[in-house]
Image: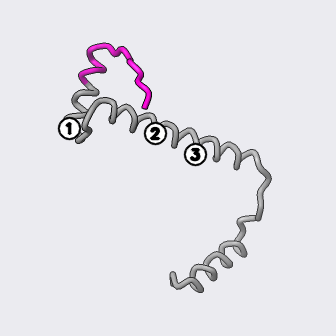
Amino acid sequence: MSTMNISLPEALKSFVDRQVRSRGYSSSSEYVRELIRKDQDRQRIRDLLLEGAASPPAVTADSGYFDGLRDWVREAGGN
């Protein structure tokens, strides 16, 4: 694992220290890693949403589409 040193103003360092104590993290590094992972997830979701918005519709979501979807769920045992 690589090491990265960051500098924080005292107010941010205090905030991180409180989060580590109150939320059960073993270290500030664990807390920061989780923040970075969450940001990566948000970025992936944003990219997928933008890709979907730019693509042409695959099917028309009309009443027939939803009727078929309901039938599919019923057949799968979802009532």
Q: How far apart are marks 2 and 3 (CA)?
A: 12 Å
Nearer to us of marks 1 and 2 is 2
The residue at which mark 1 appears reads as 22
Q: Which sits in the foreground, 7 or 76?
A: 7
Q: Distance between the residues labelled 3 and 1?
A: 29 Å
Q: Residue at x 39, y 38 (%)?
A: 34
Specify the amino acid type for callout 3: Ile
Residue 16 horizontal side relative to residue 69, left or right? left
- Callout 2 environment at 10 Å: few (<14), some (14 to 19), or many (20+)? few
**Magenta-colored span:** 1-14
Q: Which is nearer the N-term, disc 3 or disc 1? A: 1
> Disc 2, disc 3: CB below 8 Å?
no
Residue 72 horizontal side relative to residue 5, left or right? right
Specify the amino acid type for callout 2: Arg
Q: In this view, does 15 lie above or below 62?
A: above
- Mark drawn on residue 45: 3
